[in-house]
Amino acid sequence: MILGLDIGGTKCAVILAERLGENIKIIDKRKIPTDLSVSPKEMIDTLIKHADDMLKGAIPERIGVSCGGPLNSVTGIIEGPPNLPGWENVKIIEILEKHYGVKAKLQNDANACAVAEWKFGAGKGTKNMIFLTFGTGLGAGLILDGKLYSGTNDNAGEAGHIRLNNFGPVGFGKAGSFEGFCSGGGLAQLGYIKALEKAQTGVYPMYFKKGLALSDITAKTIADAADNGDETAKEVYRICGEQLGKGLSVLIDILNPERIVIGSIFARSENLLREGMERVINKEALPSAVKCCKIVSAELGEQIGDYAAVATALL
């Protein structure tokens, strides 16, 4: 039995899984709202109580924890993620190992998701793979030479911080960054800018009506409009796809992966992004590296957080 904990700013999950050869089977799961009004130790104790109830007296063979960074995967300490205020220097692995008496491991969510897609999803069987989150933000998990690469202090894969243009949507605190162009928040910003430009001429895109604010626009509303033929919405996704291609070209040239797996928004809107992405990659990246690299959508879908926590236990 493998125990996984997926810790987020709004909700957590406790997952039980069993091995089935090279695969795993999720056999039980509970979602628990993250209570930021109590101490981290109290919240962890709540998760342990749920886990104990699910285990029914059994002891897990391994434990994995997936959580947003910053964190230290070597010491097993959570170091104050922005979405978990008050969670500074939380020794979560020490707490879990003391309670259960078995080995536990901690990874940031992008790395954990990369391992999950590598072991159980679209990256299965590869030796060199990049996983991109492409959701609320943009981050990368790196599988190099058949191993997770975390870097000197767990900062490897912060691709969202790369500046692609001097101007553009803001992501990772930086205008024109990879995350600024290729994330849910970045797409909303870009969609808002393009909608205001059109509104100056008296034309309103399908996803934007007079009086709407930036907070009313999402990657999904823009994608729905694009799928229904709205030219402004299609332009937003074309720009996003081209910037995605620019960012991926850098990663392809530096890391020479055999597969790049992209989740969330790319998986939902690949039809709007792939053409621009491939056009830029074919122009910018080294042809021999492009030839051996396949870019695919993530396979694990909404269950990726569950698989990520469990996959961390198996590292």
Image (cartoon, rainbow, N blue to C red):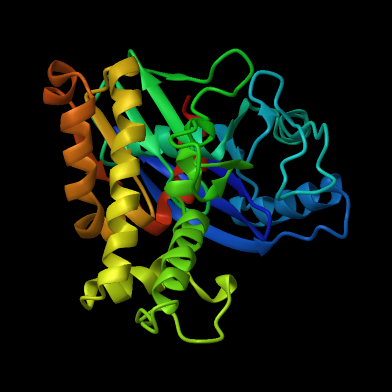
116 left or right of 63? left
- Counting the numbered discs, the total is 0
Q: Residue at left 11%, top 24%?
A: 291
Find residue 207 and report its horizontal and vertical position in percent.
40, 78
Answer with the quarter of the image where residue 81 lies: top right
Considering only vertical position in the picture, is 300 above or below 218? above
168 left or right of 269? right
Q: Residue at left 58%, top 76%?
A: 213
Considering only vertical position in the picture, is 199 above or below 127? below
Whether residue 20 is visible? no
Find residue 135 and report its horizontal and vertical position in percent.
46, 52
Q: Residue at left 22%, top 78%?
A: 228
136 left or right of 70? left
Answer with the quarter of the image where residue 107 lies: top right
Whether residue 90 is visible? yes
Answer with the quarter of the image where residue 264 lies: bottom left
- Direction front: furthest residue: 201
Q: Residue at left 31%, top 76%?
A: 225
Find residue 307 and report its horizontal and vertical position in percent.
44, 45
Considering only vertical position in the picture, is 160 above or below 193? above
Relative depth, front residue between 239 and 100: 239
Relative depth, front residue between 311 and 214: 214
